[in-house]
Amino acid sequence: MLLAELSDWIEAKPAERADLELCHSRVYIEHIAAIDQPTFVTLDTVASETTYEAAALAAGTAMDAAQSGGFALLRPPGHHALPAQCMGFCFFNNVAIAARRLQTEGVDRIAIVDFDVHHGNGTEAIFRTDDSVLYVSLHQWPFYPGTGGPEDQAERTLNVPLPAGSNDDDYLRAFAAQVEPAVRRFDPQLVLVSAGFDAHEEDPIAEMRVTTNGFRELARRSAALGPRVAAVLEGGYNVVTLPRLVNAALEGFSAE
């Protein structure tokens, strides 16, 4: 349904094993590749015989978007995926793999801005001790996965927990007061956006009140934070509203 609403898109190629190994252990990758029937890999994440193919394609799409300045429209999402564990519908950490791939091509300083309604615990874990990557997350808290609280901060990690019911004004105030100063101090060469739309007022699995205009403005402000920007789709579980929200974000990214 999402692609049917968009007129201008291209298909990417799957990530290679070497790309996945930039963020994930070889044993874990082989474990996902070997799944040959529907199974619960964790209590909240189901896989099947086609999961590895889909997840590798998602990671490859994220890499292509990061290189070209595009918006990677993909499933499964990635920001909960840990180096050796899937969770929260995520198998490979798409935005992290894209960042690592760009670093191999000479992009030294990357900021990841995550406005999915959930904290991207996997992305934080991958980069927490890496001075070359700044990770910033605005998310509902307390909420799944239980990380990213007000005390969860580090030199290159900024978590901005927001209470249930937060709306456009709440998000934009937090963005202006905390996100923008942190990213500008870091001075990235590239901004990667983990663009989740499950903070929308009509999303079925969260309790936030962000509107279409709110996502357009979040995208616009994210694009203004560095000389290059690209985005990777994370959550967003209302299939009726998702195309409209993605289009609004595309308008925001293009405005800069």
Image: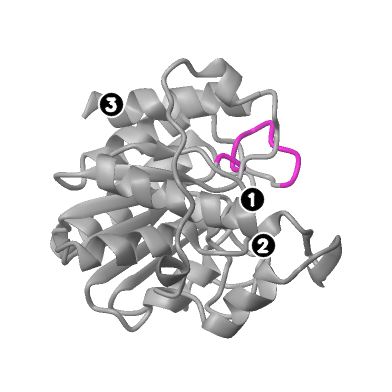
Q: Which residue is mark 2?
A: 143
The quarter in which the C terminus is drawn is top left
Are the two marked residues, 3 and 2, in contact with CB atoms closer than 8 angstroms? Answer: no
* 97 horizontally vs 116: left or right: left
Question: Amino acid under label 2?
Answer: Phe
* Mark 2 or 1, nearer chain start: 2
The local crowd at label 2, few if under 14, some if 14 to 19, many if 20 or more residues have their Cα within 10 Å, is some
Q: Residue at x 85, y 66 (%)?
A: 39
Image x and y of residue 140, in percent: 59, 55
Q: Residue at x 17, y 58 (%)?
A: 188
In front: label 2 or label 1: 2
Per the image, the residue denoted by label 3 is: 254
In the picture, measured across the screen, residue 236 lies left or right of residue 6, that is right
Q: Magenta part of the protein: which range? A: 197-205
Q: Are marks 2 and 1 in contact (CB under 8 Å)?
A: yes
Q: CA distance from mark 1 to mark 3?
A: 30 Å
Tag on residue 204? none
Within 10 Å of the Cα at label 1, are there few (<14), some (14-19), or many (20+) other Cα atoms?
some
Q: Earlier in the sequence, mark 3 or mark 2?
A: 2
